[in-house]
Amino acid sequence: MTRLLFWPVKRVPPTRSFLNQLRERFGLDQPMYVQLWHYVSGIAMLDFGYSYRLGVPVFDLIMDRLPATLLLTGTAFVLSLVLGIVAGSMAAARVKKPSGSLIMALALVFYATPLFWVALMSVVVFSVYLGWLPAYGLYTVGLAIQGLRWCLILPSTWCYQRPP
C-alpha cells in the first residue's frame, strides 16, 4: 500500500537547489584531492563518518562489534594452529601408511570443497536437523559462558579451514 501511495513522490526529480545543498554538505563540490585529504585525515583521527541508517558514528559500530570479531578470529586461529600441527605431524609420521594417505586425502578434500557450502551444510546439519548448536549469533538466551562456547563452534571451525 505504501508503494502505491508514495509512487508519485518517487517520480518527482529533486530540485537543482536541493542537489547543490547535498553536494555542499557532503563536500562533493570540492576537487577530488581535497575530498581525498578530508577522507584520509578523518581516517587518521578515527573519524569513519556517520551511519545515517543506524543513526550512530561508524566508529561506535566498529567498536561495538570488535570484541566478538576478535574472539572469533582468535578462536579460529588457535584451532587452526593446533589442528594443523597435529594433522601435519600425524601425516608426516605415517608417510607410506594408509592412515597418512587418509589424512592427506581428507586435507585435500577439505581444501577443495567450497568453504561457503561446507559452512552452510554444517549449519543445516548441526543446527537445523540435530539441534546441537545455535544457527547464528554470539550468545544464546539462557546460557552464559557455556552458550558462548557453543556459539563459537560452527564459525570458528570453518574460519580456520583455509587462509583468505
Image (cartoon, rainbow, N blue to C red):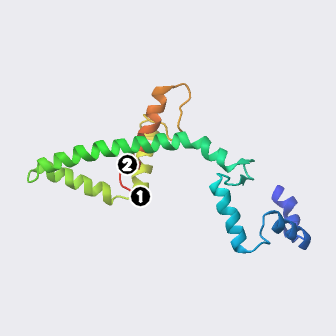
Q: Quick check: 98 above or below 19?
A: above
Residue 149 in percent (x, y) is at: 44, 32
Residue 134 in percent (x, y) is at: 49, 37
| Residue 146 quadrant | top left
- Of residue 162 and residue 32, the one placed in the foreground of this image is 32
Q: Quick check: 72 above or below 33?
A: above
According to the picture, the residue beneath numbered tag 2 turns out to be: 160
Kind of residue indicated by mark 1? Pro
| Residue 28 quadrant | bottom right
According to the picture, the residue beneath numbered tag 1 turns out to be: 164
Secondary structure at badge 2 equals loop
Q: Mark 2 to mark 1: distance in Å?
A: 10 Å
Q: Which mark is residue 75?
A: none
Kind of residue indicated by mark 2? Tyr
Residue 18 in percent (x, y) is at: 89, 67
Q: Is residue 39 visible?
A: yes
- At a point 70% along the width and 63% down the height, the residue shown is 38
Residue 20 in percent (x, y) is at: 86, 70
Q: Residues within 10 Å of mark 2 (few under 14, many from 20)?
A: many
- Of residue 107 and residue 47, the one placed in the foreground of this image is 47
